[in-house]
Image (tube, rainbow, N blue to C red):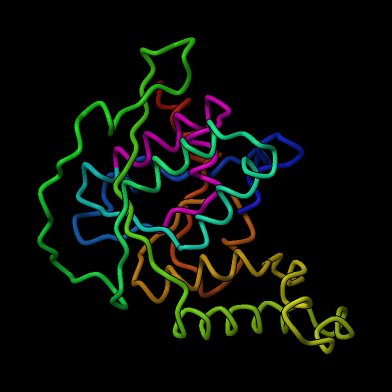
Amino acid sequence: MRARNNGKPRQAEFFSDAPPLDEIRALGKNALVLIDSSALVYLVEGPREFASAVSRFLEMAAESGARFAVSSLAFVELLEAPLRRGDEALAAEYRRLLSNSSLREERSLPEDPSRPEDRSRPEDRARPLDRERPEECLFFPELAVFPLDAAIGEETALLLSLARRASAPHNAFKANSGGVGAASTQALGLGLGLGDAIHIATARVSGASAVLTNDEAWKRHPLCPKVFLVSEIAFALREDGE
């Protein structure tokens, strides 16, 4: 996740190879995109440029026919900070976002799913970023929630083992320490933490073809599906004049 940094969202370093927006529009009707919790934090809390970038990504991908998913870990990551601070309004906003979701029990979504009628009102799918500028509305997607089950747990272990092996022999003493504590400390050569590994494992087990995050470490893992970075999308939108 790693979106919050002392209250300020993390921004990736500047780059010159932002992916074209056409890649997003070309995702297609059978594509499943896993959304990292960090992208949902941007969507709800800002900053404004990143919130708009996430919203436009979701809107363009939805127009192509893509569907969206999150790990059940998102409930923990999104609600922990506002509950700890006693920010009930923000917690309610995250509950509202996550309530527009459905729990998926199967391993992957069918190739050509029959979509239930969308009973949400238009004003529930496009909501203002803040009360100061109510005319600026953001796209809030329907999310399929994949629970952490045995298959995702095993895939998570595989991803962490690969990340930790990549860090050897420099960090061999940490790799030999074993246990969840060792796995959850940034799993070293690839910068992959336990939460990151759960999200990527969920993407792989659910059959997602792409992920949306702002964590560059995900790009370095060889088993991660195609990564769209929020900061790169924001840059591409500026260059495109949107």
Magenta-highlighted residues: 34-60
Magenta-colored stretch includes residue 12: no
Query: Secondary structure of the magenta portion, mostly?
Result: helix
Quarter placement of the N terminus: bottom right
**Position above or below: 223 against 51:** below
Horizontal side of 164 relative to 240 (left or right) equals right
- Occupied quadrant, residue 61: top left
Counting from the top left corner in percent of width and height, residue 21 is at 36, 40
| x 68%, y 67%: residue | 193
Counting from the top left corner in percent of width and height, residue 124 is at 28, 31
| x 40%, y 76%: residue | 205
Counting from the top left corner in percent of width and height, residue 77 is at 58, 53
**Position above or below: 207 against 51:** below
Quarter placement of the C terminus: top left
Horizontal side of 166 relative to 76 (left or right) equals right
**Position above or below: 88 against 217:** above
